[in-house]
Image (tube, helix red, strand yellow):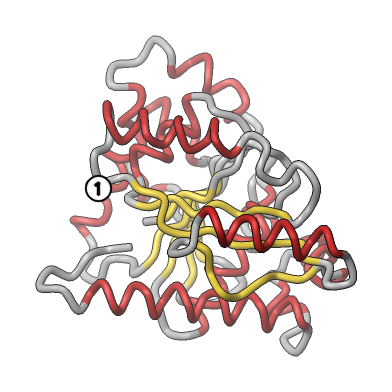
Amino acid sequence: MLTISNQKGGVGKTTTAVNLAAALARSGAKVLVIDLDPQGNASTALGVDHRSEERSVYEVLVSDLALSEVIRPSTEHEMLDCVPATIHLAGAEIELVSLVAREQRLRRALDTHLSSMERPYDYVFIDCPPSLGLLTINAFVAAREVLIPIQCEYYALEGLSQLLSNIELIEKHLNPELRLSTILLTMYDSRTNLAQQVAQEVRNHFPTQTLQTIIPRSVRVSEAPSYGQSVISYDFGSTGSLSYREAAAEIAKRGAAKAGAPSKEQH
């Protein structure tokens, strides 16, 4: 279970969640994307209706609705499901404050659902809003691993130390299993020295977590969501599609290496 997080907006969180999920589903994995961002961009990109009258992750968090009631199949692939977000989620931060075990609500719903499944999901991706409120904390508590997309631009590492200390706090107080497992470099422009410097700096700081694959800046990647598709469906042969498929293969390979240990871990 991976939470995709970065407090900076516009770094490719949702794009990364949707395209990695689509690539893994195409390779035969059973994948769930939980959209925790009130804007619902992941839901849109996966072809899942998230108009305000639809039931969504909001009811799961605030009204204890079972996750099975809101899971929708994605038009993207038969192995890919989505829990949509609606605009009601914008008020959930305030509503959650007064609820019992407010940080654990997503985890409880998710654990209950996974334990009832005949074939559980191989991957669960949680797409967070670009802020550290109760929604993101719920995502961190529900997940086992954090994936951080970092754009190869100026100020890319700014705010990262804050995010890492937040992850540390949550690991210490709420979820001892949580760790930063993966960093993905996004929006890479090979023509600029700056992009190369940022990429090198990230690799120096996080040598084991940073994937070898780098996601280039790509018009195709930006266009795909407006068609309710991942870039992999929208333009399979594009560089963006190829890069996300390579990144997904790297993540799967890492998971397989971990699963080689006696206990098969769910990523």
Q: In which image quadrant can residue 103 be found?
A: top left
Left or right relative to 132: residue 234: right
SS under mark 1: helix
Find the residue positioned furthest to the top: 98
Amino acid of disc 1: Asp
- Asked whether the viewer can see residue 254, the reply is yes
Residue 75 vs 26, above or below: the answer is: above
- Asked whether the viewer can see residue 53, the reply is no
- Badge 1, how many Cα within 10 Å: few under 14, some, many 20+? few
Q: In which image quadrant can residue 215 be found?
A: bottom right
Left or right relative to 120: residue 156: right
- The quarter of the image holding the N terminus is bottom left
Find the residue positioned furthest to the bottom: 237
Left or right relative to 99: residue 75: right
**Which one is nearer the viewer's eye here, 34 or 103?**
103
Find the residue positioned furthest to the left: 262
- Residue occupying image coordinates x 34% and y 42%: 142
Q: Which residue is mark 1?
A: 111
- Residue 107: give x, y in percent of width and height: 31, 40
Q: In which image quadrant can residue 169 be found?
A: top left
- Residue occupying image coordinates x 42% and y 36%: 167
Residue 122 vs 146, above or below: the answer is: below
**Which one is nearer the viewer's eye here, 194 or 162?**
194
- Residue 68: give x, y in percent of width and height: 35, 51
**Which one is nearer the viewer's eye here, 34 or 189?**
189
- Residue occupying image coordinates x 53% and y 23%: 92
